[in-house]
Amino acid sequence: QVHLVESGGGSVEAGGSLRLSCVSAGDRYSNHCMGWFRETPGKGREGVATLDKFGRTTYTESVEGRFTIAEDDAKNTLYLLMNDLQPADTATYYCAAYVGLRRICPSQWQVDNANWVGWGQGTQVTVSS
């Protein structure tokens, strides 16, 4: 399994912005759906956004209109652009690849599905009010 490396987290005030990056060593997941997830001690892990190889995106309702998932294939890098951050967005953010399907994402988040692979150490995002 090739691990992904997340970066770009930090501490910001409400209304601020951050850009998270997720780098893959090589093109191991170049034909797979990619996703961003976040985890907090009280809520567990939840899906944030997914991007399939046809450019289709899915967002959890709470981030719709504020977050954008994008990728740069040439750099093997996945991004999460986060605007208008709110305290509720405070979490550790992870990226993963879905290897159970080629090119498309699962119909539901399925955060506990073992086909989501490549989990790194995550990057912490803290938003103060």
Image: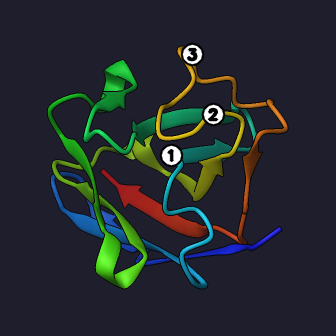
The amino acid at mark 3 is Gln
In the depicted structure, whether residue 6 falls above or below residue 118: below
94 relative position to 52: left or right: right
Crowding at mark 1 (Cα within 10 Å: few <14, some 14-19, many 20+)? many
Q: Which residue is the site of mark 1?
A: 35
Residue at 33% in and 71% down: 73
Give the Cα separation between the discs numbered 2 and 3. Answer: 13 Å
Which quarter shows the N terminus?
A: bottom right
The amino acid at mark 2 is Leu
Q: Position of residue 112 (x, y in %)?
A: 80, 30
Q: Secondary structure at mark 2?
A: loop
Q: Which residue is the site of mark 2?
A: 101
Q: Residue furthest top?
A: 107
Residue at 55% in and 67% down: 124
Q: Position of residue 10 (x, y in %)?
A: 42, 75
Q: Nearer the viewer, mark 2 or mark 3?
A: 2
In the depicted structure, whether residue 68 falls above or below residue 109: below
Residue at 71% in and 35% down: 100
6 relative position to 42: left or right: left
Q: Earlier in the sequence, mark 2 or mark 3?
A: 2
Residue at 34% in and 25% down: 62
Along the viewing direction, whichever of 32 and 50 lies nearer the viewer: 32
Crowding at mark 2 (Cα within 10 Å: few <14, some 14-19, many 20+)? few
Q: Secondary structure at mark 3?
A: loop
72 relative position to 91: left or right: left
Label 2–label 3 contact, CB within 8 A:
no
Crowding at mark 3 (Cα within 10 Å: few <14, some 14-19, many 20+)? few
Residue 76's label in the rendered image is none
In the depicted structure, whether residue 93 falls above or below residue 37: below
The amino acid at mark 1 is Gly
Q: Which residue is the site of mark 3?
A: 108
Q: In this figure, what is the number of numbered marks?
A: 3
